[in-house]
Amino acid sequence: MDPDTGVLKAQTVEGYVAVLGLLKCGKIWFCPPCSAAIRNGRSAEVTKGTVAWIRGGGLAYLVTFTPRHAHSDRLDALMDAIQGTRAPGQDEVEAIGAEVEAVKAELEAAKAAVREAVEVARLGAPKGAKKAAMAAARDEAAPLLADLGRWLDHARGAARAKRRQAGAYQRLITGGVWAGRPDRDETGIRDRIGYIGMIRATEVTVGLASGWHPHIHAIVLVGGRTEGKGRDKVLKTRPDGTWDTFEPGEAALEEWEDEWRAVWTRALAQADPHFRPSDTCEIPGCKCAGKGHGVDFKRLETVRDAEKFGEYLAKTQDGKDPANELTRADMKDAYGENMTPLLGRIGDLMGGMSEDQAPGVGSLDWCKGHWWEYEAAVSGRRAIEWTRGLRQLLGIQGGDTEEDDADMLFQLDAASEFRAGVQVKTQAWHDVAAAGLDHAAVESVQGTEGIDLEAVTAVYDAAGAAPGSVRVLTGAEVDQAWETAKAALAERRQVAAARRAAADGKPLPTQKKGEPTEPQTIRRPSGPEPENFLTVVRQAAAARRAERQPAAPAPTHPKE
């Protein structure tokens, strides 16, 4: 943070808030400001790709997948069931592999020693007793070999258990019914509907009564033909250069829906019978039309918005924008008995709001406990993901990793057009962060109707910040202040480099030989940096994990 400029909270023309002057974590699952910005960028990507596909003659469906869930279900088990288990890290893979190889080497060494012992017994036994002596030597070594064999089986089993296991989502696009059987010259559902790929977003909500509710939204693109494989795969085109799209038949589309419902239901039942969703429904007039609530299909259309002069995806029957329904989990802060994300309510409650005033449900302790479970269950998972090769087919640049999320975050800040903003003094931001109101401070600037100074200052007043700590800026003033802050940062970096060089006794970049080296100083914000409420929650979560984690049993080795 630049102590002179402070923090800039800029309202973009798209309506989200770019927080300038602070380091950003880029965590789409955990950080409300970063999540909002990243999801906004992802939503634009999804809309661009889907609209282009429909304009080219293809079809798009918004498909929602839901498992059955109850208050007692753990989130990690539900996530493994729908999304698959997480792959172990490289260090863990290498450690497991080294353990297997070590046991194999010990077993081979034991076998060699047994062979040598048997040969010694043969040579030392009198004629006529050699077979008995050799058998006795083998019998004596048998327990050791058996123990080593069991040890090796255990090590191999542990290695297999660490491999990534597919979830119900991955099962949807595997198998002969879906992909066909080339050896029998049979096509699958994939070819009959012209499937080219899908974009998957996982959303997690939680409620007091129903517990965790993870579910997947996917925009599935069909009606296309492709050629080539891997990196060479492209969409087929007609002589005029347009995509060779087609309208799948009703029978093929119905077959696809039935297959995915059956696969989703079967895969969840195999993971845990309790997770099996309903595949029938007897509620009169229910929107599932008697097909159950595990899988829901909605066809999307492209329309022209007369007011915005742009293309967007037609709203679904419940009035939600499909692109936002897919990517903008941050917009679903609290509704009904469920909410997402937990962190917003934790910050509000830590900042002094009552349980009735803060959006969402649950006490502070309840929210903290569920945050610990949430963080452990979703860490290392991708929130939004395009199937392999789909970006390439549609000409959409980018990727789905955490590094891509961070890149998008900074690209959005650099490319954003600012409508207005507020400039917050350094100490005032420290006060807000210490009070756990930093998320509320960001939310107070969000929108497309300009800055409500009264709403913004109310947050800082609640945190005890000094009067006059917030100043409203125009879009041009935000640009100017941001450029000034970046220039000051670059200058301080140069001064810091010069100071380090002076401490090492090296000439400064602008110093002539023989001139004395003078130390340089940098102005720093007064007072210690207070803990942010996110840090407090993570520390509490770490302590709780340490309490719950059972002690690892000491390894037992076979007796020699």
Image (cartoon, rainbow, N blue to C red):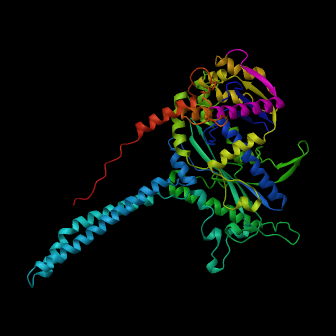
Q: Residue furthest front?
A: 514
The quadrant of the picture occupied by the C terminus is bottom left
Does residue 494 appear anywhere in the picture? yes
The quadrant of the picture occupied by the N terminus is top right
Residue 413 on the magenta span: no
User: Which quarter of the picture shows residue 428?
Assistant: top right
Is residue 13 depicted above or below 451 in this figure?
below
Q: Nearer the viewer, residue 229 or 209?
A: 229
Which residue is at a point 51% across and 37% down the rendered structure image? 372
In the picture, measured across the screen, residue 550 lies left or right of residue 74, that is left
Chief SS of the magenta region: helix
Q: Position of residue 137 (x, y in %)?
A: 17, 73
Q: Nearer the viewer, residue 556 or 500?
A: 500
Q: Position of residue 409 (x, y in %)?
A: 70, 42
Is residue 160 depicted above or below 507 in this figure?
below
Q: Nearer the viewer, residue 178 or 266?
A: 178
Q: Residue furthest bottom?
A: 127
- Magenta stretch in the rendered image: 466-495
Does residue 449 appear anywhere in the picture? no
Q: Position of residue 224 (x, y in %)?
A: 77, 66
Q: Position of residue 553 (x, y in %)?
A: 33, 48
